[in-house]
């Protein structure tokens, strides 16, 4: 009798079947100015390299009320970017057990309201400002000894703030500590140069060895920090700064050597490979490959990308780079040029296709861009040389967000002639999106057939290099 009673609970469980497992993540996004045609994309930020978010892990359409209901059965703990209709608006730390509601206007990310499990991490990440880049200028105003004291004090205050958030996810706390440590290292890297500029002095700024070690401390936390986009940007900045110093010293010791972009990429690649942390090397090589693909010629791009694939065939950034390469394919030599439209200074409409049958040298710039303006003397000289060549058009597309600033600039420089147009949207414009413009100036050569000749054409200051490319198209 006793044994039969013992079996009853087990039989009852078997009759009921297996208990349903709750989803790993549940999100309800009640966002303003969203209709039922809107789409929400979610990206794993640990696998993103550049400014563009590529290859979403999930895409969800809004329901009939314009609300997004997100359910994920599994999740790798980490930081995820949310984007509505191709406009990124917030970063969330997601882990198994998140059940959160998000309300507000996606165009006002600082004012979004979070509630439920996971809200604490979202709010902390959004508001954590210890040693943010916005305060760099304030720290530069201090002399060396006060800078160190102020830096250490701010760092400790930030650590206290993190430690006091002990109710948050433990892994999230570890990630935030890595980020703060990287921010501190960035301050020590920026300070000497910033201080020299502020004091208008060439005298070397020396910091204690203990402060110089802050970069090493940040590197030891790479496994945790690399999940965070800001940590990755900081480490890339630190590595670039250190490399620039090495490169300058090498150039001074070898003044007769000719430098090209290929040599620069090769030297930077070898410098990265000297790093001891494999996770950091993986990221830095991937970032170098991305920069080479985006801004430099095919030879330099292949040099960085091939080394990266050989060293890290299973890199988490591989899919991102493959997606970038695919986007660049539509901009390859011989592909039809994508239409560019804008407003001329007189208000009339200007289009790239208006100049079909001519070679077009398109200069993308903005009034606030120092390197862009620095090219204008060479640009004016270049245009003057081709003034009698009716088959060449020099077009200047401004991505200024302030149209009045653009109009004022052109009025104050009447010698800056050519086809000028203003494109709406600044960095979010169709021009920047279609031609993958993430930095300016950018120059694009279009042949007489309306096809792309070089989407990363040489600058006006490149001398015979750009002249030879234009002449080859005439």
Image (cartoon, rainbow, N blue to C red):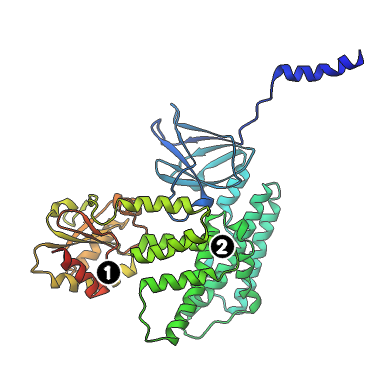
Q: Residue at x 66, y 50 (%)?
A: 171
The residue to which callout 1 is attached is: 459
Give the percent coordinates (x, y) of residue 456.
Answer: 30, 62
Foreground label between 2 and 1: 2
Labelled pair 2, 1 in contact (Cβ < 8 Å): no
Q: Is residue 186 above or below residue 105?
A: below
Task: Specify which label sits upstream in the sequence, 2 or 1.
Answer: 2
Image quadrant in which the N terminus is located: top right
Residue 418 lies in quadrant: bottom left
Comparing 125 with 448, the one in front is: 448
Comparing 16 with 322, the one in front is: 322
Comparing 132 with 219, the one in front is: 219
Give the percent coordinates (x, y) of residue 194.
Answer: 49, 75
10 Å crowding of disc 1: few (<14), some (14-19), many (20+): some
Q: Residue at x 13, y 55 (%)?
A: 355
Q: Is residue 67 above or below residue 165?
A: above
- Label count reads 2
Can the viewer see residue 392 in this picture? yes
Q: Could you tell me which secondary element the residue under label 1 belongs to? A: loop
Can the viewer see residue 351 in this picture? no
Q: Could you tell me which secondary element the residue under label 2 belongs to? A: helix
In the image: residue 390, left or right of residue 85: left
In the image: residue 54, left or right of residue 425: right
Image quadrant in which the C terminus is located: bottom left
The residue to which callout 2 is attached is: 280
Comparing 57 with 126, the one in front is: 57
Q: Residue at x 20, y 70 (%)?
A: 468
Specify the label residue 432 is tagged with.
none
Residue, far top: 1
Residue, far right: 2
């Amino acid at each position: 009798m006793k044994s039969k009673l013992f079996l009853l609970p087990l039989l009852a469980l078997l009759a009921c079947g297996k208990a349903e497992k709750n989803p790993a993540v549940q999100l309800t996004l009640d966002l303003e100015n969203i209709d039922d045609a809107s789409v929400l994309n979610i990206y794993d930020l640990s696998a993103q390299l550049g400014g563009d978010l590529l290859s979403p892990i999930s895409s969800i359409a809004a329901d009939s009320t314009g609300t997004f209901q997100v359910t994920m059965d599994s999740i790798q703990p980490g930081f995820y970017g949310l984007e509505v209709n191709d406009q990124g608006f917030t970063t969330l730390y997601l882990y198994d057990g998140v059940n959160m509601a998000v309300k507000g206007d996606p165009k006002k990310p600082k004012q979004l309201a979070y509630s439920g499990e996971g809200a604490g991490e979202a709010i902390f990440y959004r508001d954590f400002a210890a040693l943010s880049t916005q305060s760099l200028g304030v720290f530069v105003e201090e002399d060396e000894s006060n800078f160190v004291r102020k830096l250490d004090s701010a760092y400790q205050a930030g650590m206290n703030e993190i430690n006091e958030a002990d109710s948050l996810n433990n892994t999230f706390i570890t990630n935030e500590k890595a980020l703060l440590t990287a921010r501190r290292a960035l301050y020590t890297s920026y300070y000497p140069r910033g201080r020299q500029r502020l004091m208008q002095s060439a005298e070397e700024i020396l910091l204690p060895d203990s402060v110089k070690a802050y970069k090493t401390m940040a590197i030891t936390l790479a496994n945790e920090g690399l999940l965070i986009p800001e940590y990755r940007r900081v480490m890339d900045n630190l590595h670039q700064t250190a490399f620039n110093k090495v490169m300058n010293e090498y150039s001074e010791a070898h003044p007769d050597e000719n430098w090209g972009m290929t040599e620069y990429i090769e030297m930077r690649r070898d410098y990265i490979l000297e790093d001891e942390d494999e996770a950091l090397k993986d990221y830095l090589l991937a970032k170098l490959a991305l920069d080479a693909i985006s801004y430099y010629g095919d030879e330099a791009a292949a040099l960085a990308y091939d080394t990266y694939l050989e060293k890290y065939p299973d890199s988490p950034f591989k899919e991102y780079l493959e997606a970038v390469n695919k986007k660049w394919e539509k901009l390859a030599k011989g592909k039809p040029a994508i239409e560019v439209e804008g407003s001329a200074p007189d208000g009339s409409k200007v289009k790239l296709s208006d100049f079909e049958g001519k070679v077009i040298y398109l200069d993308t710039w903005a009034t606030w861009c120092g390197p862009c303006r620095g090219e204008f003397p060479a640009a004016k000289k270049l245009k003057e040389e081709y003034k009698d060549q009716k088959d060449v058009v020099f077009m200047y597309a401004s991505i200024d967000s302030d149209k009045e600033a653009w109009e004022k600039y052109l009025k104050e420089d009447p010698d800056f002639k050519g086809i000028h147009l203003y494109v709406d949207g600044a960095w979010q414009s169709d021009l920047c999106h279609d031609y993958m413009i993430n930095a300016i100036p950018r120059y694009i050569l279009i042949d007489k057939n309306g096809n792309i000749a070089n989407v990363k054409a040489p600058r006006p200051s490149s001398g015979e290099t750009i002249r030879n490319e234009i002449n080859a198209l005439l």
